[in-house]
Amino acid sequence: MSRPGPSSVTAAGKMPVHMGSGQSQQQAYATLTPYIRRLVATGFDIPGILHGFFGDDWVAGIGPLHEAERRNYLFAAKSDNWLRVKANYDMDGEQMVPFLKPLQNVSEKEIISAETSWSEWLAMQDWMLGPRAPIEVEEGEARSQEPGFRVKRERR
């Protein structure tokens, strides 16, 4: 069985955890995603802090993951209320995010990118809405409709 290459490990947001000399020779991996999510949600995802945690090459290493988590945080805030967003950012084992802060240092480019992605998400959802919605005919209703019209009826 081959070990994952560095590119797949980096893409998954995982960092190798080196075992001590008396332990197994296998490398274990720890995902960085929950930590980056918490830094974003609490407003501590500033370059100085990211550099302190992840080193000089943090942009090359976790930059794409950081960017994705910032976009996910924008989406979470747009799609649900504060309490549910906070619940989604709390971790297992009763490790709760102490507070949520609005996204910090947002650039116009980042907002436009998020808006574009959000619009693509809504377009995907629309496959099941509007003229492409499944036709639901309640018992007893006639199935004849004028060609070209599809009407979805709410159940009573």
Image: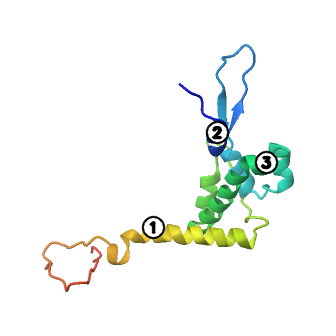
Mark 1 residue type: Met
CA–CA distance in space, label 1 to label 3: 33 Å
Q: How many marks?
A: 3
Residue highlighted by disc 2:
9
Residue highlighted by disc 3:
58
In what element is the residue under mark 3? helix
Compared with residue 143, is residue 12 higher up or lower down, i.e. above or below? above
Q: Residue at x 75, y 19 (%)?
A: 20
Compared with residue 92, is residue 26 higher up or lower down, i.e. above or below? above
Compared with residue 106, is residue 3 higher up or lower down, i.e. above or below? above
127 displayed left or right of 115: left
Mark 2 residue type: Val
Q: Quadrant of the C terminus?
A: bottom left
Mark 3 residue type: Trp
39 displayed left or right of 77: right
Provide residue 152's location: percent of width, then percent of height. 29, 77
Label 2 CA crowd tier, 10 Å (few <14, some 14–19, many 20+): some
Provide residue 11's location: percent of width, then percent of height. 63, 45
Q: Quadrant of residue 107?
A: bottom right
Closer to the chain start, of discs 1 and 2, is 2
In what element is the residue under mark 1? helix
Closer to the chain start, of discs 3 and 2, is 2
